[in-house]
Amino acid sequence: MADHDSRIVSLSAQQVRDLLCMKDVIRVVESGLANFSKGPDGGVVQPVRSVVKIDKPDGQTGQGFFGVMPAYSADDNILACKIVSFYPGNAKYKKATHMANIMVYDPKYGELKAIMDGEVITAMRTAAASAVATKWLVPKTEEKLVLGILGAGVQARSHYEALKVIYDFSEVRVWSLTMESAMKCADELGGVACLTAEDVVRGADIVVTATFAQTPILKKIWVKPGAHINAVGACRADWSEVDPELMRDSVIYVDSKEAAMKEAGDIIISKADIYAEIGEIVNGSKEVKTDPITVFKSLGLGIEDAVTGKLAYEMYLAKSTKP
Ligand SMILES: NC(=O)C1=CN([C@@H]2O[C@H](COP(=O)(O)OP(=O)(O)OC[C@H]3O[C@@H](n4cnc5c(N)ncnc54)[C@H](O)[C@@H]3O)[C@@H](O)[C@H]2O)C=CC1
Ligand SMILES: O=C(O)C1=NCCCC1
């Protein structure tokens, strides 16, 4: 039997939160996306996630999805796997709609080194991926921007945290299913709650859609030319958040083309052309195109969890070995 260190580090949500800062997560996610989009040259092996649908027709048991997301990066020496469950209906039971754990392994022997909460990482790395896309597609100027957020949950909050690392906002607007949740979220972000999605989107420079909507909530006629949209929800082939016309008439960026063709209803239903993976922009294999509107359709990749999970593990080791 191999001689191995059997100590497995376990990190709670609070520990992960204390170990990570958004600026570092943006940095590692940017590099992970760039390597991912180099194909075999980037040394990343990451299949499209396997998703099991949990659906018992008695109406009593939960209805949701269970996803398994492994990733290996040879360059970064990372092997990890996230397991995530997402149950849109959990909100009514006052439970988190997303629950996750991330396992980090030593790629040399395949030995498990750490198991950690994945909810905080899912919130941070998803927002970090959107921040990377936005940074490359919306040049920072002296001007303060207007941020519009559709949805008032975990991702609404983490997207504000990530985007404010890069931009100064003159206004942050929030809309959601209920005015109460929009007001609570807007209060926390120092923004304003809007009665309609249209009020959020008209005149906004950057728009985030992070809801559980299964049909479009964002209309083309509201979006100003030059705006950028981070479309984060609708991660099923038959769900969409964005008007199909807006998808077809925009320059579309994705995190993974392979995943988008399998999981992104916004792309599959609209038949919009994908211009590039955002990692191809970061690694310089594609040129930036922005006219007239840009959409980053995000689904979430195992490589984003892997690089962030490894970062949390390394931060933990660095802190715990300090004299
Ligand atoms: N692209 C990615 O990497 C990831 C995407 N997601 C997706 O992002 C979305 C938001 O996730 P969280 O903020 O964590 O969820 P959450 O449960 O914390 O918040 C969801 C928000 O959407 C609102 N909402 C629900 N149904 C709606 C509808 N029909 N129309 C308008 N608003 C509606 C809720 O009121 C709530 O404000 C979900 O679709 C989720 O699956 C989540 C994690 C990663
Ligand atoms: O990447 C993730 O993690 C998720 N993506 C889509 C919805 C659930 C979680």
Image: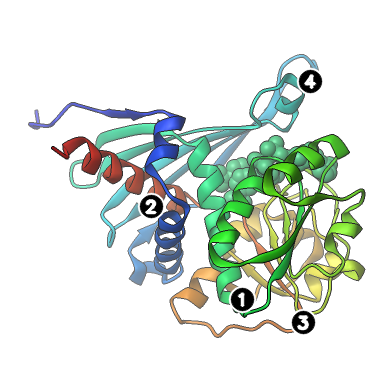
Where is residue 302? Give x, y as percent: 46, 49
Q: Which mark is residue 307?
A: 2
| Callout 3 secondary element | loop
Residue at 84% from the left image edge and 62% from the top image edge? 201
The part of the image, by quadrant, that contains residue 144 is: bottom right
Identify the mark nearer the N-term, 1 or 4. Answer: 4
| Callout 2 secondary element | helix
| Callout 1 secondary element | helix
Identify the mark nearer the N-term, 4 or 3. Answer: 4
Question: Is the residue indicated by label 2 positioned so its CB lies within 8 Å of ligand 2?
Answer: no
The colour scheme is: rainbow
User: Which residue position is annotated with label 3?
Assistant: 292
Task: Specify the quarter for ligand 1.
Answer: top right
Identify the mark nearer the N-term, 2 or 4. Answer: 4
Distance of mark 4 from mark 3, alpha carbons?
45 Å
Distance of mark 3 from mark 2, alpha carbons?
33 Å
Identify the mark nearer the N-term, 1 or 2. Answer: 1
Q: Is residue 285 visible?
A: yes
Residue at 61% from the left image edge and 76% from the top image edge? 137
Q: Nearer the viewer, residue 102 or 22?
A: 22
Q: Nearer the viewer, residue 301 or 294?
A: 294
Q: Which mark is residue 57?
A: 4
Neighbour class for label 1 at 10 Å: few (<14), some, many (≥20)?
Answer: many
Q: Which mark is residue 290?
A: none
Q: Are marks 4 and 3 in contact (CB under 8 Å)?
A: no
Where is residue 238? Give x, y as percent: 77, 48
Distance of mark 1 from mark 4, alpha carbons?
44 Å
Residue at 69% from the left image edge and 42% from the top image edge? 188
Q: Is residue 58 left or right of residue 19?
A: right
Where is residue 31? Give x, y as percent: 40, 65
Identify the mark nearer the N-term, 3 or 2. Answer: 3
User: What amino acid type is highlighted by mark number 4?
Assistant: Pro
